[in-house]
Amino acid sequence: MARTAGSHSDITGPRIREAALTLFARHGFAAVSMRQIAAEVGVQAGALYNYTPDKQSLLFDLMQRHMESLLSEVARHVSGATPAARLESFVRFHIGFHIGRPDEMFIAYMELRNLTPDNFARIETLRRRYEDMLEAILQDGVAQGAFSVPDTKIATLGLIAMLNGVNTWYRPEGRLSQTQVEGIYWDMARQSVGAEQGVV
Amino acid sequence: MARTAGSHSDITGPRIREAALTLFARHGFAAVSMRQIAAEVGVQAGALYNYTPDKQSLLFDLMQRHMESLLSEVARHVSGATPAARLESFVRFHIGFHIGRPDEMFIAYMELRNLTPDNFARIETLRRRYEDMLEAILQDGVAQGAFSVPDTKIATLGLIAMLNGVNTWYRPEGRLSQTQVEGIYWDMARQSVGAEQGVV
DNA sequence: GTTCTATCTGAACAATCGTTCAGATAGCAT
DNA sequence: ATGCTATCTGAACGATTGTTCAGATAGAAC
């Protein structure tokens, strides 16, 4: 653990982010001290400031990396000829992506209030971009008569909230495989937008 | 605002809880100081300790009151001859109850990690009781062939997560009435469990 | 009008906070 | 082997934290 002075470290940066991620998720941003993060890395608190200008930037960095990873991945995974096919790929991607990143997701949603106004606006822009992708799928489906949803905006937020709920109970060592979980949520999502089964 | 020494106050207790509720919801438990709460009430920090033994108890008190209010209200509102009717009353109650208590709901879900283990267990027991009520409805529906859900436990958590999402966007001054919002979520919930329309 | 008591003030406490920085150190380049 | 430089230590800073408590105060009871 304990690091000796002068030891170089290309890996200290990532390790600081890992430690901060875990601790922020577990105890909350405000409840975690820079000294706790440093101790987890095996370093003194002052050393953190070689990698981040301050605590706030550390939080923002974690959120921004997560959101940009989410956006670049979703673009690679969501496809399909029909709105139902695109919705299925979106749902399965969302579940799969977040199942493996419970800490990131928790922070991205719960620590928004600890961002400065500027940083908050930046993260919100990214999140909005993601939500708009889902809403576009729903709008397509409504336009084509494939979905039955009275309000695509609300359905978007409702769906995302429902999908995000997966991390309140899913554990990788549990009885269900990731594919099974994806299937369960796809069933619920499909039914909630009134899409017929099997027309994908 | 500023209180003079010795002024009695039967209302200081509730005002402390109100202030703590608002501030905890806005900034997070750990980010709010006892002095901030006191300032909101118009009192010095020391005076708070006439009403709570410590900060932790103040948080627990808020959560416990909320959960017990939720449980006593849900018992009064949920009824119906069929599973679908009971599910509809549950969904409408859940939306209506939480729409008017965004701060309470936010804290009840997000500040669990700041509870001591003992207090956490107590709140979890109450929450579990609420979730079990919903799952019982789903189990009835499945047993009677009215619902189509592969896993009632997961569907319960998925539904509650979806319903809780209402507070991420609903504002009372918005374009939708509470009844409309209840209807939208009931539509999504009904469809997500595969219940037929109009058989309520 | 006096006494009594619940309530609140205001100061103090030890601990911890985020952040800074001079100096020590270790590995790389030469 | 020597110097260079990025990295880290360890101590320090002023501010703030939750909590305590002796004393001041105001309203109720008599």
Image (spheres, coloured by chain):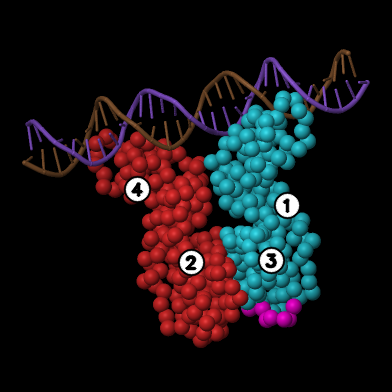
Chain colours: A cyan, B red, C purple, D brown
Magenta-colored span = A193-200
Overall secondary structure of the magenta section: loop
Label 1: state its secondary structure: helix
Q: Specify the label residue A177 is tagged with.
A: 3
> Gap in Å between the C-alphas at discs 3 and 4?
49 Å
Chain containing the residue with disc 3: A
Q: Do residues under tags 2 and 4 come within 8 Å of each other at their CB atoms?
A: no
> Gap in Å between the C-alphas at discs 1 and 3?
26 Å
Left or right: A69 in relation to B79: right
Q: Specify the label residue A167 is tagged with.
A: none
Label 2: state its secondary structure: helix
Q: Residue at x 43, y 51 (%)?
A: B119
| Dot 3 amino acid type | Ser
Q: Do residues under tags 1 and 3 come within 8 Å of each other at their CB atoms?
A: no
Q: Do residues under tags 2 and 3 come within 8 Å of each other at their CB atoms?
A: no
Residue on which the image places disc 2:
B131
Dots 2 and 4 on the same chain: yes
- Which residue is farthest bottom? B199
**Quadrant in which the N terminus of chain A is drawn:** top right
Residue on which the image places disc 1:
A68
| Dot 4 amino acid type | Arg
10 Å crowding of disc 2: few (<14), some (14-19), many (20+): some
Q: Mark 2 or mark 4, which has the lower sequence index?
A: 4
Left or right: B32 in relation to A126: left
Q: Mark 1 or mark 3, which has the lower sequence index?
A: 1
x, y percentage for residue A179? 71, 68
Chain containing the residue with disc 2: B
10 Å crowding of disc 1: few (<14), some (14-19), many (20+): some
Label 4: state its secondary structure: helix
Residue on which the image places disc 4:
B15
